[in-house]
Image (cartoon, helix red, strand yellow):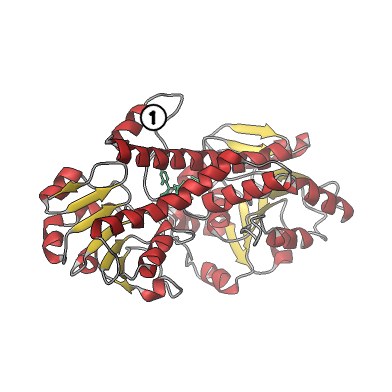
Amino acid sequence: MAQRIAIFGAGYIGLVTAACFAELGHTVAVRDIDSDKIAALQAGRIPIFEPGLAELIARNAGRLSFTVDADDAAADAQVVFVCVDTPPTASGDADLSRVWSVVDSMKGAAHLSAFVVKSTVPVGTGARIRAVLDTAGLRHVGYAANPEFTAEGRAVQDFMHPDRVVIGTDDHATAELLAAVHDGIDGPVMAMDVRSAEAVKLMANALLATKISFANEAAAICEATGADVNLVMDAVGADARLGRGFLNAGIGWGGSCFPKDTIGLKALAVNGGYHPQLLSAVIEVNELTRRRAVIRLKEELGTLDGKTVAVLGMTFKPGTDDMRESPATVIVDRLLTEGATVRSWDPMAQPQTTPPWSSTTRCASPLDALTGSDAAMLVTEWPELRDVDWPEAAAAMAAPVLFDGRNLLEPGAMADAGFTYLSVGRATVRG
Ligand code: UDX
């Protein structure tokens, strides 16, 4: 049955959730404190890039509204979804201030049926929110944790066809209501208690991050022993118990989730008196992987001081304009510190005005960035980089040396193009 829903937070998750619920037939009010963002949305402009999102919002415009007023958003709602961000604090704990300000704005919302947190929060947060709602006279309002597992660039697809929908609640009526809200979504509902649902999100991201760090450590061992990490991971991942996904070696993970959630889970464990050794190593391998990329280029060139390096890709992965925690930022910072000049290219990243990017030159095309450079680092696997005329690029560079941080290109073809081609967990080839 169609519900009236209020979504708090118009970021990636909030907007995708709102658009998909509207597509399912619900009426959705979206509230954000950023008045510019709300004004843009009211004018039909979508402030983020996410494939399919603009079309979904346009198609369901009649069921979607946008406001900065919390009372307005909640006035009619039966179910509130909290989709605000929870960035790490200085100590690595999750900053819940935005979640608490939504909870505070519910004090007069006695008409609500359910209050649902989609934001990633530490295990135990639901119990604290429950207590505050009870004290505010909202004991009758159901509480649920409903973590999201959508990846940027495919968030709409992930939302509509998920591997699972996790609904964590301690009361049966709220579980049924939330299952009904998700009616029409093509994926199984897994119902559980609030704490377990809160833990699922953190554990899932930690295990995905573990697979990536494993692949990156495997790559270093392959480099030392002469094996090819791509071939090894293809065969390792062919075992159905392991799976090939998230075993791509590269320059490490970034983005809005893995860095924050691995640090958050570690903080949660340590605060509870447990030292998470495996998780700590997973985080450390990720940090080393980025630095090792620059070390390998430095070893190849002898020095980076005075060299011009083309950095191809800026975002944390292709298909998004998101620069949050991008490994490219660490790599550029290291290159500059080593004395290199950086010419960068990215098809989608917004202009960057803060360090280290403010000390780089942004180029209009890969060839533009490569022309005259002493070396190049491919850090985001944008598909258009496959289509670069690499022989032409080799001729245009001062020295044709390329470190492929994503194993996007073929070693044989790059050697034929005239490159000294370094990649991750594979032998260096020289043209
Ligand atoms: C991730 C999770 O996939 C998603 O379920 C969760 O809700 C949010 O975090 P996202 O951050 O959008 O999604 O990106 P994802 O596609 O998972 O990639 C994360 C990072 O890992 C990227 O920097 C990517 O380049 C890197 N990665 C991924 C690898 O280095 N190797 C891989 O094999 C896979």
Task: Count how many numbered circles sit on residues in the image.
Answer: 1
Residue drawn at point x = 67 percent, y = 42 percent? 198
Residue 349: x and y in percent read: 39, 65
Let me know if residue 151 appears in the view.
no
25 displayed left or right of 331: right
Toward the front, the furthest residue is 302
Quadrant position of residue 242: top left
191 displayed left or right of 364: right
Closer-to-camera residue (168/336):
336
Residue drawn at point x = 74 percent, y = 63 percent? 101
Let me know if residue 32 appears in the view.
yes
| Secondary structure beneath label 1 | helix
Residue 79: x and y in percent read: 71, 50
Quadrant position of residue 13: bottom right
Is label 1's Cβ within 8 Å of ligand 1?
Answer: no
Closer-to-camera residue (93/65):
93
267 displayed left or right of 128: left
Residue drawn at point x = 62 percent, y = 58 percent? 88
Closer-to-camera residue (155/60):
155
Q: Which residue is mark 1?
A: 237
Relative to residue 112, is residue 102 depicted above or below? below
Q: Quadrant of the N terminus?
A: top right
Closer-to-camera residue (418/26):
418
Residue 185: x and y in percent read: 54, 38
Residue 33: x and y in percent read: 64, 69
Question: What amino acid does circle 1 point to?
Answer: Gly
